[in-house]
Amino acid sequence: MASSPESAPLRNDHSERRSFLKIAGISTATAALGLPGWRLAYAAALTKEKREKLTPDDIIALMKKGNERFRLGKESPHDYLAQQKASAKGQYPAAIILSCVDSRAPAETIMDLGIGDTFNARVAGNIANDDILGSMEFACKVAGAKVVLVMGHTACGAIKGAIDNVQLGNLTGLLAKIRPAVEATDYQGDRSAKNYGFVDAVARTNVQLTVIDIHRRSPVLADLETSGALKIAGAMYNLETGGVDFFS
Ligand SMILES: [Zn+2]
């Protein structure tokens, strides 16, 4: 990629940044270049100019770095009031994240993101229905986000419910949208909701099928990706380790 996000000033506190880069095994020589970048979750919100310099791959790399900071307990200093004030007149989010409603998987927190950094859609089992696809099209085609990230997580209750064919009010219809992932998961062994290995394998398949579904059902997003302006990607968040595993 043209401008490595690893060389971008993710923080204003250079000493802290250097120590993080050292931990992450990243050369401080490239960091010292001081190339413009995405000061995630620091004082100011993401601006149009900063976003324009980032490619979709840069943004995914920055999300990975944010998750590393989270896992290391070295999150950026969050000045939410400053971010709120800086973003009040306009927003330039870099991505839209589709994730589960699970209380333990808040995308912004686990990737050390701040106000104005990303759009967020949350629904149990992170499936893409028409309204979510419309939200993604707004986020990317109208508002300029460059990444769609579908993020599932381990030990997901919605996935367990789909495996068990739970019938309950409006939940029944939602779980039916996850069922194809249960059927499509190639897994030798106990295919029950009691087996976390199977549950997590289905969750991973569900992310992959949702990414395919987005391509298939949204020509708007598929065309943006073909043009290079957008990347549609999947990831799994591990509740035990705090790590986000990005596919590909
Ligand atoms: Zn879940």
Image: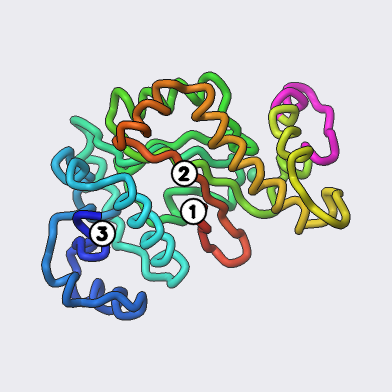
Specify the amino acid type for callout 1.
Answer: Ser
| Quarter of the figure with the N terminus | bottom left
Numbered disc in front, either 3 or 1: 1
Whether label 1 touches label 2, CB < 8 Å: yes
The numbered mark at residue 231 is none
Quarter of the render that holds ligand 1: top right
Q: Name the residue under label 3.
A: 5
Q: Could you tell me which secondary element the residue under label 3 belongs to?
A: helix
The residue drawn where x is 38% and y is 56% is 112
- Which one is in front, 45 or 147? 147
Earlier-in-chain disc, 2 versus 3 = 3
Colouring scheme, one of rainbow, by chain, secondary structure, one colour: rainbow
Q: Mark 1 points at which residue?
A: 248
Q: Does ligand 1 reach within 8 Å of label 1's beta carbon?
A: no
The residue drawn where x is 53% and y is 25% is 216
In magenta segment, residue 168: yes
**What number of labels is visible?**
3
- Which one is in front, 203 or 212? 212
Q: Does ligand 1 reach within 8 Å of label 3's beta carbon?
A: no
From mark 2 to mark 3, how far is it between C-alphas?
18 Å
From mark 3 to mark 1, how far is it between C-alphas?
18 Å
Q: In this view, does 2 lie above or below 134?
A: below
